[in-house]
Image (cartoon, grey):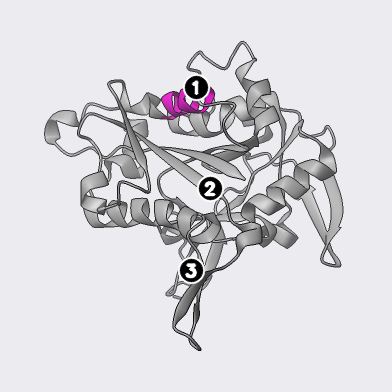
Amino acid sequence: MRLLVVIPHYFRRSEEEKTTSDLANRHGSTSGQVAARTHSLRRCIHSLHQSVGNSQAIIRHVDRRVEPANEAYRHEVHIVVVTTGGSHLIEQAKISENLIHQFSVEDNPQHLGFLAQRVLRDRWGNYDYYCYMEDDLAIEDPWFFEKLRWFNSYVGDEKVLLPQRFERSEDHRYKKVYLDGDLAKRVTEPFQNIDEMPELKSEVLGRPVRFTRPSNPHSGCFFLNANQMRHWIDQPYFEPIDTSFIGPLESAATLGVMKTFNIYKPALENASFFEIEHADRRFISLIRFADQ
């Protein structure tokens, strides 16, 4: 398959740029931690090429040769990183030019996610999947897109599967924590009705798998096949910038998809069936334990 992945990326550098809203200050784009942000960006991009990309091989020790591997489950990955001005860490990350294409715009940094959607629109017709990822997410599951394809062949294109987002830790009581637990129902009621077909059930490799409509549909990403992307583009609300779901970052990643499709995520008992790592520790670090 051919995959287009668009990643909005912003890193504020100077004191003069500290004019964005308090909302933006809660996010990594304004954190000032250059090393951590650089690592996250590198991991985001390299994980795509390593886990699902074409450049995979096996070493044949018997004759000291290298041969292709995973040919049945690897994909052609094109990554576009959307930036504004010099407020980015692409040079610091030392990412090879053959791995990404940088698309620079002059606009409000908080609107980069919406501009990334337009990149997907403008390149429609050339890919099998159209993907949006925040710049601190990493895909480590080589079967990620096979699972997406299976899901839609099973339930149709009017439903979208989003991954459970998680962080991991070595020094907390919980070594792995999923981030996007329930929101108050009123937060998303204007955009979705989770009581309509609230769950789906199937079986994979002889094990039951359940999917539910989440009250918190945010995952910081979405992955749409060509039919789904075309359907969303055709909606009258695709073009206007609407930040009414929590804020601009959450709205860019989630709101348009939530308005257009029925969103599902793996149920908590099988959350790891379809997941994506948040390459940060700021959520898990908020957990405090009485026994620590």
Q: Quadrant of the N terminus?
A: top right
Report if residue 117 lies within the magenta region. Answer: yes
Q: Which residues are magenta?
A: 113-121
Q: Nearer the viewer, mark 2 or mark 3?
A: 2
Q: Earlier in the sequence, mark 2 or mark 3?
A: 2
Residue at 41 percent across and 56 percent down: it is 46
Task: Name the N-terminal-most of marks 3 and 1.
Answer: 1
Q: Nearer the viewer, residue 109 or 5?
A: 5
Reading the image, the residue beneath label 3 is 289
Q: Which residue is mark 2?
A: 76
Q: Amino acid at mark 1?
A: Asp
Separation (CA) of disc 2 from disc 1: 19 Å
Q: For the residue marked with disc 3, what is the amino acid?
A: Phe
State whether the magenta stretch is mostly helix, strand or loop.
helix
* Secondary structure category for the residue under label 2: strand
Counting every numbered tag in the picture gives 3
Note whether 75 is above or below 104 in the view shown.
below
Q: Which residue is identified by label 1?
A: 122
Q: Quadrant of residue 203?
A: bottom right
Amino acid type indicated by mark 2: Glu
Image location of residue 245, percent across then percent down: 54, 27
Tell which tag, 3 or 1, sits nearer the viewer. Answer: 1
